Each structure stands twice: as C-alpha cells, then as structure tokens.
C-alpha cells in the first residue's frame, strides 16, 4: 500500500536507524496514524544536517515525509519530547519492543492504539523505576499489541466454559485458545499457571515474583506462537533477563 | 563514461569502491595517476595491497594494526588502568586528537542491534569483560554514541560489570557544546543537558 504522497508533522518514534550510503540514514519510523514507515534521511550523518536530530534516542518527533514508493524521503524532523531513560533495563525494554514491533506489524499498517501504548511505555520507563513497575508497562504493551493484531487474551475468564478464573485453581494456557482449568494437583510446567498469578497480571499487579514470572511466560508463549518463525534476536543475548 | 581499455576502465570502476567516489571523480583520479603521477600510483598500489593483506585487529583493544598489539597498547607511557570503550576507530582518532586521554581503548566495531542481528559476540564483549576483570584496569569509560543503540550497548556493558569491585564505570558528560550559544543548540541536547545538570558546588571541588 503506497498511497502516501506528502505527510506533514506526523507524530512518530524512531524504531531503528541504519547507515545508508556515505552520509545518509535509513530510518524505520513508527507513526501515530500511518503505522511503520521507512524513510531515507538524506545527509543525516553530516555534522550540521538538520535531519541529524532523528538520531536523538528515546524521543517523540513530528516528522514530515513524502514519496510514492515504499521508501519515502524524510523532509523534516522536529523533536517534540525526549524521555530520560536511566536504567539498563529501560534501554533493553525499548530495544526489545522495537524489534517486536518491526517483526509483528506490517509496513504502512495503521495501529493508533499500539502507538498510544508505545508512548505510555516510554512515559512509564522514564526516570528511576523498580523492576516490577517496568515489567507492568512492558506486559501491558504486549497485551495491547496482541489485542490490536487480533490475538487478544482473556485474563479473567476461561475460554471454553466461560467460567471466571479462580485464584486457587490451575490453568493451562494455549496461545490460540486461552486458559482452561486443569486438575489442581497438576505439576507446575511451562504452560500451566496459578489463577492468582493470572488475575494479578490482569489487574496489573506484578509485585509478587511468581506473578511477574508467570505474566512474562504467558506473553512469551503467546508472542512466540503468533510471531511464528520470526524469533526475536534480542532474546539470544538477554537470556538472563 | 570512457571505454578506453579494459585496464583503464577496470581501474576507474575499482576506484569507486572508495566512499564518496563516483564515476566522475574516479575518472579524474585515474587520469591524474596515469598522466602525472605514476610513481605515486605504484606506491599507492603497493602499500594498499600490503595493508589489506597484513592489517588485522590488536589482540587487546581491536584497533587496526599489523602487529599483535597496537602502538597504543604497547606504549609504556600510557596508563593501562583506564580503558575507553568506543564504537569505531574513527572515535579513537577523534579522542587522540584532543590530547585529553592517556589511557587505552577498546573498539567494539559497532553497537548492539538485534534487528540487524548484531549481538555481544559480534562486538567481542567477552574480550572486553575479561579485560575489565584484569587487575590493572581501574576505570572503564563508556564512550559509545549517544544514539539508542549506542546507549543500549553502554547499559548492557554496565549491567554486566556493575557488581565488579574496584572497577569504576563512567560515561562521558553530555550537554551544551563549548562555545555553543544556547539559541543554536538542538532541542534534544538542551533537554538532555537539563536532565543531566550539575550543582556548581560539585564542579568547584
Ligand atoms: Zn591495542
């Protein structure tokens, strides 16, 4: 889909940049109204180029671009907000989410809700945060992403029976189906979770270590399933996370 | 373009592997060498072949060198307790020109970028971590670029080494450039400089 001819002052985040030719950059933008857009920022690597600001990390921009093909020209890039990230885990989270967005969404597919959630994630990651606070923002982002791509997960009700999830019961998670109650003496395994942890995830309370790990595993199972073979490279080197 | 002889055409084409050299300037260079500076051309070809063949990476800091260790690492006058971590050799050149730093370097030759599948292995981070653990190193200065990937790389290194006793981890200060008028400084830099402002009391110590 290449309908865009000229877009002015569109809110956007930069997901990825790559050196292009002698002095230019290829930029993967995530825009509010048009989804992911690839642009070339001509001369952006020259010291005095006005487009150089596109390299400012962790920032919201107003971008103007034009072109009829897949690869558009970045004409202007104005910085609207810079988020101050201070923790290593915040940087890892952004790099993870950026790779996730690039692999999970199609180019020029509008996803305003995901964009809003992405902005909330940046706001959430700003400043000094506890690890579990950061994870709450990450998990809600993943949930909204799945929801918007048509793979929403119900964290309050069982999928087939429609019964409410109970704190003391155990549930099996199938990414294409949802949660199903299993015998309470089932051993904890990769796809089996305690109701309490699922409900904590649902209410955004990840203060308990068990709930934090469970929510992470649920999202991991769902994302791996829906991303198919597009596995995330970042997992290879953040395995200790 | 010309079509003079296979060798002349071939040389013009080969020249274009250099950054910033298009067909026009390649043609100008080749004609210059053939018309006016054949000796220079022979020297160029000779040293280029030797350099490409013989230059590898320093075993300690990964800068380009034809020896096992580069001249910075083997210079006894330099302070081995400081290691400055940079993304590229051109960063080393820039820092060396400032005459401000007398320690050693570690060159990553890139930054972490999962989308391009560049991870710790490609940057030889194991090598850096081992170096940081050696007794002679007292401070690691993280001087990667101030881009998302550059900062992520620094934070990754910091995260890995932060619990090491007796190792100081620092990063370069960022803010308004010297001689810069605030009016002309870009907004990102101003915002960053504000969040990283320092108390004057600390500066006068
Ligand atoms: Zn060296």
Image: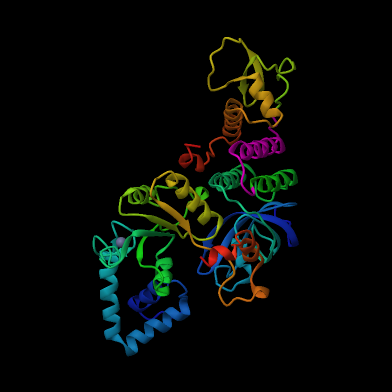
In this rendered view, identify the residue nearer to me: B8 or B33. Answer: B33
- How far across and down, in percent of the image, does residue A40 sit? 60, 63
Residue B139 seen in the figure:
yes
Residue at 63%, 76% in the rendered image: B181
Residue at x-position 58% and y-position 44%: A93
In which quarter of the view is residue B188 placed? bottom right
Q: Is residue A143 in the magenta section?
A: yes
Give the vertical position of B169 relative to B23 (above or below): above
Front position in the image: B188 or A55? B188
Residue B112: x and y in percent read: 48, 51
- A141 inside magenta stretch: yes
Query: Mostly what secondary structure, the magenta segment?
Result: helix
The quarter holding residue A103 reads top right
Q: Which is nearer the eye, B176 or A14?
A: B176
Residue A44 placement: quadrant: bottom right
- Asked if residue B118 can be seen in this view, the reply is no
B38 above or below A125? Answer: below
Query: What range is drawn magenta here?
Result: A126-153
Q: For this view, does B115 lie left or right of residue B187?
A: left
Coordinates of residue B103 in the picture (x, y in percent)? 35, 64
């Amino acid at each position: 889909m290449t309908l865009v001819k000229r877009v002015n002052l569109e809110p956007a985040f930069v997901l990825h940049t790559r050196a292009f030719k002698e002095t230019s950059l290829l930029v993967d933008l995530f825009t509010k109204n048009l989804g992911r857009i690839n642009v070339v920022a001509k001369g952006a690597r020259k010291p005095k180029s006005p487009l150089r600001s596109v390299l400012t990390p962790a920032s919201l921009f107003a971008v103007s671009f034009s072109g009829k093909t897949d690869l558009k020209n970045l004409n202007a890039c104005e910085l609207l907000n810079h988020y101050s990230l201070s923790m290593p885990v915040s940087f890892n989270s952004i790099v993870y989410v950026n790779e996730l967005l690039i692999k999970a969404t199609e180019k020029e597919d509008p996803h305003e809700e995901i964009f809003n959630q992405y902005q909330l994630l940046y706001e959430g990651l700003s400043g000094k945060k506890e690890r579990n606070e950061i994870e709450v923002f990450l998990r809600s982002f993943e949930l909204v992403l799945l929801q918007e791509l048509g793979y929403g997960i119900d964290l309050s009700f069982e999928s087939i029976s429609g019964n409410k999830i109970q704190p003391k019961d155990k549930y099996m998670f199938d990414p294409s189906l949802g949660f199903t109650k299993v015998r309470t003496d089932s051993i904890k395994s990769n796809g089996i979770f305690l109701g309490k942890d699922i409900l904590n995830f649902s209410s955004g309370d990840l203060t308990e270590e068990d709930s934090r790990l469970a929510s992470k595993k649920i999202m991991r199972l769902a994302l791996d399933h829906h991303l198919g073979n597009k596995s995330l490279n970042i997992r290879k080197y953040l395995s200790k996370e | 373009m010309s079509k003079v002889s296979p060798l002349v055409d071939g040389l013009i084409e080969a020249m274009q592997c250099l950054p910033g050299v298009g067909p026009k300037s390649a043609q100008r260079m080749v004609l210059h060498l053939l018309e006016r500076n054949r000796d220079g051309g022979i020297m160029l070809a000779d040293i280029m072949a030797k350099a490409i063949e013989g230059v590898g990476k320093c075993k300690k800091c990964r800068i380009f060198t034809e020896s096992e260790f580069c001249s910075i690492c083997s210079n006894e006058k330099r302070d081995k307790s400081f290691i400055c971590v940079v993304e590229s050799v051109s960063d080393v050149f820039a820092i060396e020109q400032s005459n401000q730093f007398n320690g050693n370097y570690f060159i990553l030759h890139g930054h972490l970028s999962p989308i391009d599948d560049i991870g710790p292995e490609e940057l030889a981070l194991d090598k850096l971590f081992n170096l940081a653990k050696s007794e002679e190193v007292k401070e690691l200065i993280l001087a990667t670029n101030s881009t998302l990937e550059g900062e992520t790389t620094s934070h990754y290194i910091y995260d890995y080494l932060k619990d090491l006793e007796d190792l100081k981890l620092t990063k370069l200060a960022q803010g308004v450039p010297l001689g810069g008028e605030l009016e002309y400084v870009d907004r990102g830099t101003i915002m960053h400089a504000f969040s990283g402002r320092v108390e004057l009391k600390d500066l006068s110590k």
